[in-house]
Amino acid sequence: MFNRNRLISGGSINRNKPINFKFNGQSLNGYEGDTLASALLANDIHLIGRSFKYHRPRGILTSGSEEPNALVQLGKGSKTEPNARATEIELYEGLEASSQNCWPSVKYDIGALNNLFSRILPAGFYYKTFMWPPSAWMFYEYFIRRAAGLGEAPKEKNPDRYEQKFFYCDVMVVGAGATGLAAALAAARSGANVLIVDEKPEMGGYLISSKAKINNIDAKDWIKDTLTELNSLSNVTVLNRTTATGYYDYNYITALQKVTNHIENSNSKLPRERFWRIRSKQVILAQGAFERPLVFSGNDRPGIMMASAGQVYMSQYGVLPGNSITLFTNNDHAYTVAVDAISKGAKVVVIDLRSNVSSEITKLCEKNKIETYNSHAVISTHGSQKVNSITLQELSEDKQSFVGEAITINTDLLLMSGGWNPAVQLFSQSRGKLRYDDQISSFVPDVLVDNQYVIGTNNGDFNLKQNLIDSQNAGISAAKETGNKKDIDEFISEANEPNEFTTSDVVPYVLGSKPVTHGSKHFIDFQNDVTASDIFLAQREGYISVEHTKRYTTTGMATDQGKTSNVNALAIMSHIQKKPVGEVGHTTFRPPYVPQTFGAIAGRNVDQYFDPQRLTAVHQWHKDNGAVFEDVGQWKRPYFYPKNTETMKEAVNRECLAARKSVGILDASTLGKIDIQGPDAAKFLNLIYTNAWSKLEIGSCRYGLMCNEHGMVFDDGVTTRIGENHYHMTTTTGGAARVMSWLEEFLQTEWLDMKVYCTSVTEQWTVLSICGPKSRDLLSSLTDEKIDNKSLPYMKMKSIKVCGVEARVFRISFTGELSFEINVPARYGKYVWDKVIEAGKKYNITPYGTETMHVLRAEKGFIIVGQDTDGSATPSDLNMDWIVSKKKEDFLGKRSFIRSDTAREDRKHLVGLLINDKKTVLPEGSHIVEEASKKPPMKMSGHITSSYFSPTLGYPIAMAMLKNGKNRHGETVLIPLMDGKIIEATITDSVFYDKEGVRQND
Amino acid sequence: MFVIKCPYCGERDQTEFSCHGESHIARPENPNEVNDKEWGEYLFFRSNPKGMHYERWTHDHGCRQWFNVKRHTVTDKIIQTYTMGEEKPEDNNV
Ligand SMILES: [Zn+2]
């Protein structure tokens, strides 16, 4: 195989294992150990994609997770991944990737016309142009999204599996460069349980690409030895390919581990990614630093790269991305890269912004035959799809103007170095406070949070030996804090690296041939196409605060979250505002540190595992008998039982009529049930419910309303006195947990001396609700007890045997029919249900679902809390003054009934509506108006809460909350529908059927 | 995400708990005797301090008990947890 830019030797790639891959359809090859970026560079491919706004050609800027430019669409079909960073994708056999954001191809991109129009596409352009008229936004958006998108999400469901893992440790180290490894080793030797994570496949950080020495051996070898020891210790967990993505309170850290992403056609049982949720007693941040780009005109062309990235490609991947290299710098450290490149056979020219470079650097350049231009600036770059030449000019003493003539020199790779920015993102997420350091011209950790250390370049320190000693001490100290106090020997004796970074000569931007303020191409945020001139524009237009500048220009808002751009943007703001960078401030860093898949966040909580399902004891019977299910909270409830080809309406009509004419059966097991016991139970109920409970006899049932302290109804249900100090409370299906918490709240926080005990027994009972004129005959056939109207009258409960099973039978009714709720222990539920169905055949027993239940109760005007009420209705609003005790001194909500707003006469009240045309079933939620006009807005005076066709009555009925409704019976209101029709309805009482209650009372 | 020390169970992750707002707001002894303003204060007014806050939490996925938490709203440091009925601690150490 042939890689044009591959060096003959060197790097940690496996030259015995060539790998075939495709980029934009072109078949290429690389080696095992390559990233997609290094393999493309090896093949001399620099043009990777088009930029977001101007569609400018873009290449590879970095070699890591901070990459803003080289984003690709990875893979195909259901597994495709958009915006994948080529610098992080490990090469595997058969990998396919393509450029994003270009059409028809990366080389000939129509959207690049935006580049020609860039003078009219400045910062804030979208806000200014497309915001008016508001209705047109939908139209613009379609085109903007097409023209300026990133990659595409898969259209099919992603078939991969994702796992989550909880993890607890004494010391977590983030970053496995030399400092992280030293800290982990010290903590581990001290006896602590240690977790160390690193985002790269190969640990060791940037020192594996350097000529540094630690303890007089190559840093590479020291790293290898240290890793060997860490891997051998049982108290250490070492995770590569794992990125800490979020750092939350109390040292809670999330980390994303790539498990099989990098393996071709992984058929293993392993997940694609594993999401770690870590709680560590102590955290040591050792994430290192990002090299800072220089801001000059045309700094975004393919073939322009960070100096450190150039070094990584040469040393780690054996790729020399250019032969005639120019290096543009403001600091000493970058000269190391120049020396390395020369040793690999390249020609190197260094352009240094500084007028005075040290004598050591001058000597180094002489020795290595490096051509240098001091006090020079790159003022423009040239080349259509890749840089081929650059123009430089000498700067004046004050750097504010040029002296001499511009020179143009040919180059096929421009490396740049503007100094280093510590990777403070995670630290900042943890609420650590930053300070601007003038020495390195960047933000560094200042005030730490509890149980945290920041070490090495992550802390803004660049002396290798001191960093390693500090790291070792941090490891020892962190271990001590967690009680691991084993004495260990110091293990760092010596360390050094050539041309250590100390300081950089920072200019906010490099003078160009055109003024920077208007339309020049000094890029700051490469991914979002934000230029220095955009920052000037934002300041001119008054977006001066750092938060405003960020949002107006979108700098730092791309998927890389400004890892390479933030500090440069702040430096320009500082220059314009004439105040120190530290005073300009910085925006808040937020999780995730790198983009994170939704699959990993969801883990196994998908499909049927998304939410627990609650099933009644009779569930299988419902399934077997063709029930259509409805979700009520987490419960699966039968909605209706269609027979043959019945529609929902036909099924519900049939079920309703059966319940009214013969006997129907409902599985009411989901109803909330709370067992209340204790000597103060009656006193307690008196305070919880609006009506009186002291005189309720044993064996009697009573309906109750619960209000919150605002006087608003929040649940209802029937409660029965089982014994002297024993009650059985029922609640709505959806409100059961809320009511339970409500009771506990008052028992535990207000009435601590009350002796009352509440137990949720919802799942302990199966409830069979049989209703209809034949229900008594049916029940009689299943028990030896007498259940005539005298032995079991309306609103009474009897403990009897039904089908031989101990049962509590409540004679209560939510349908207005003669009705019995048979409660049996859940383990007998299915048995009794089968027996009842069998015995009921004679009466054509008809199972009915929640829809029929809703219709039957609406015919009777019974409310459903949460459907007819929305937390803003008092009992009086619901015409339920009858259930509010006038005698009781106190109960929850009582005092609020006399607040001026609650006592108001013209509040919204519950009313019934009869539709004048006797046929339209109004959509629930429809608005009620007094006067109709052709188009909205219309003045609204209420809304429909319940609406059904009543099979019993033969016409539609509705319930509504209507302003001043209780005083308006007989009047006509209008209901405009979405299709423009206006329906007339007459206000009425909300009880539509059997107003006297003869049927339920028998 | 906090680590909260339930007075009954010990240290647990925040996901096991829920917060129910400011603590030490007693329900008026006799609601009928307070005026609208006083009742309104009980219902709607909360202190929302920048600094020390006393609040009610429940250990929902544990012992289901209510208890008090003294927390600094800027740093989110939990200074103390204590049971219902215990006296409100001094607003001293930050
Ligand atoms: Zn607890």
Image (cartoon, coloured by chain):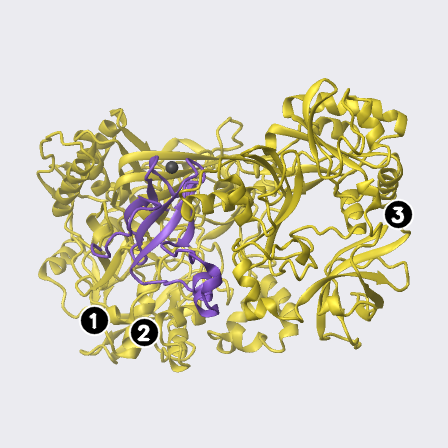
Circle 3 is placed at which residue position?
A952
Q: Colour of chain A?
A: yellow
Callout 2 secondary element: helix
Q: Quadrant of residue A9?
A: top left
Q: Depth check: A543 or A699 in front? A: A699
Callout 3 secondary element: loop
Residue A246 % position (x, y):
37, 48
Q: Residues within 10 Å of mark 2 (few under 14, many from 20)?
A: many
Figure quarter occupied by ligand 1: top left
- Horizontal placement of A263 versus A438: left or right? right
Q: Quadrant of the C terminus of chain A?
A: top right
Q: Are callouts 3 and 1 both on one chain? A: yes
- The numbered mark 3 sits on a residue in which chain? A
Considering only vertical position in the picture, is A566 above or below A448?
below
2 or 1: tag closer to the N-terminus = 1
- The residue depicted at 23 percent of the width and 37 percent of the height is A181
Q: Which mark is residue A573?
A: 2
Residue A980 % position (x, y):
82, 69
What's the residue type where badge 2 is placed?
Met
Q: Quadrant of residue A916?
A: bottom right
Frontmost of labels 2 and 1 is 2
Circle 1 is placed at which residue position?
A375
- The residue depicted at 57 percent of the width and 63 percent of the height is A897
Q: Quadrant of the N terminus of chain A?
A: top left
- Horizontal placement of A254 versus A915: left or right? left
- The numbered mark 2 sits on a residue in which chain? A
